[in-house]
Image (spheres, grey):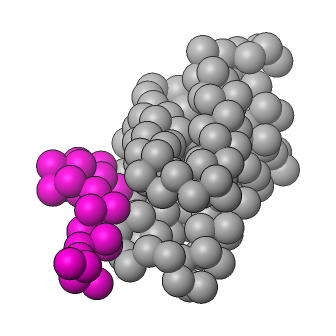
Amino acid sequence: MTAPANATATANDLTPPLRIAMIGSAVVLGLLSLLALSRAAIGVAPTAPGVGEIAVTLHLVSVLPAIPLGIYVLLTRKGGGRHRILGRIWMALMGSTAITALFIRQINHGGFSWIHIFVPATLIMAWKAIESARAGRIAQHRRRLASMFLGAMVIPGLFAFAPGRVMAIWAFG
């Protein structure tokens, strides 16, 4: 007896509590980002240190579209061409976000800060997620990408709203 066609999709999908955590965290991060960007765009946010640096600009240009794209890729139908293309774009955005973060060091007087630990974590998680997909270990691929979304985007993204950081200055003054 063969399994129904949708049984594989359900078996390889995220659990409801994980879906809720991911959606909730993406909504919070997205709304905070919109608040910060809106305040900066209309000129009511104070100028943040280092905001004119190319690394900060590239970092923001990479990470901000990665929030909605990441949640979209993780929560929609998997395995098709659209999933693969959008997943590659998301991985490129996450890689760019991690690499540009290496050049953002003005808060720690030119040195790395504790938040830079997410750079190698992001790059390693990305590599392992790609490796598991190529090997056909889809459940492992799914777990790694869910971990990457939460551990390499949401957690450092929320820390971006800590006092003294660009997004916090823009969002809260």
Q: Position of residue 172 (x, y in %)?
A: 38, 42
Residue shown at 64% from the left, 53% from the top:
135
Is any atom of residue 143 visible in this view? Answer: yes
Which image quadrant: the C terminus?
A: top left
Is residue 114 shown above or below 153? above
Task: Confirm whether the magenta stretch covers residue 4.
Answer: yes
Is residue 5 shown above or below 31? below
Residue situated in front as seen by the camera: 47 or 34:
34
Report the predominant secondary structure element of the magenta stretch.
helix
Residue shown at 78% from the left, 43% from the top:
100
Q: Position of residue 114 (x, y in %)?
A: 60, 15
Q: Is residue 85 left or right of residue 13?
A: right
Q: Is residue 127 left or right of residue 8?
A: right
Q: How many marks?
A: 0
Residue shown at 66% from the left, 24% from the top:
116
Q: Which residues are magenta?
A: 1-28
Quarter of the image for residue 4 reads bottom left
Which image quadrant: the N terminus?
A: bottom left
Q: Position of residue 142 (x, y in %)?
A: 44, 53
Quarter of the image for residue 49 reads top right
Residue shown at 25% from the left, 79% from the top:
2
Is residue 82 shown above or below 57? below
Residue situated in front as seen by the camera: 167 or 101:
101
Residue at the front extreme, as displayed: 1
Task: Confirm whether the magenta stretch covers residue 75.
Answer: no
Residue situated in front as seen by the camera: 91 or 172:
91
Q: Is residue 61 left or right of residue 162?
A: right
Residue situated in front as seen by the camera: 10 or 120:
10
Is any atom of residue 49 visible in this view? Answer: no
